[in-house]
Image (spheres, rainbow, N blue to C red):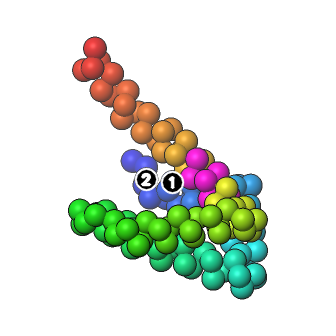
Amino acid sequence: MVNIYDSANQLAKDLQQTQEYENLKKAIADVQNDQESADLFKKMDALQTKILTAQQSGQPLAEEDQKAYQELNETVQKNAKIIALLQSEQAIYKLINDLQKEITNPINDLYADLRK
């Protein structure tokens, strides 16, 4: 019997060898090395966490948070380093999503006859 966790650990190591991972690593370093970009990222991250927490607890989003998010989003759209980070993040999550589909294909195949 195969140890599936060994395979998962190898997949994690392989992921670190991809161009998507290297691009994300560089984009993060670029943001960290630019104080303005780093501060902007921290603000964006904190506000997104606040919004997500409110949504998860079923609370309506405060109007001031909506306005702050819109203003922050406009500022973020003008920061090339953060845009590059977000694009790199999106690319690696696309890769991970593709991998997840491959991993779950055998499970979906098990249900194929049942779904007919």
Q: How crowded is mark 1: few (under 14 residues within 10 Å), some or many (20 or more)?
A: few
8 falls in the magenta region = no
Residue linked to disc 2: 4
Q: Find numbered disc 2 in the image and state the secondary structure of the residue it sits on.
A: helix
Residues 16 and 8: in front is 16
Q: Position of residue 11 (x, y in %)?
A: 57, 55
Residue drawn at x 55%, y 42% as measured from the top left: 98
Question: Is residue 13 in sight in this rendering?
Answer: no
Looking at the image, residue 60 sits to the left or right of residue 99; the answer is left
Residue linked to disc 1: 7
Note whether 111 is above or below 30 in the view shown: above
Residues 27 and 58: in front is 58
Residue drawn at x 67%, y 62% as measured from the top left: 77
Label pair 1/2, CB-CB below 8 angstroms: yes
Which kind of residue does numbered mark 1 sit on?
Ser
Residue range of the region highlighted in magenta in the rendering: 88-94
Which kind of residue does numbered mark 2 sit on?
Ile
Quarter of the figure with the C terminus: top left
CA distance separating discs 1 and 2: 5 Å
Q: Residue at the bottom extreme? A: 35
Note whether 81 is above or below 114 in the view shown: below
Q: Residues within 10 Å of mark 2 (few under 14, many from 20)?
A: few
Q: Quadrant of residue 12?
A: bottom right
Q: Where is residue 10 in the image (x, y as percent from the top left)?
A: 57, 58
Q: Find numbered disc 1 in the image and state the secondary structure of the residue it sits on.
A: helix
Q: Residue at the top extreme? A: 116
Residue drawn at x 66%, y 80% as measured from the top left: 38
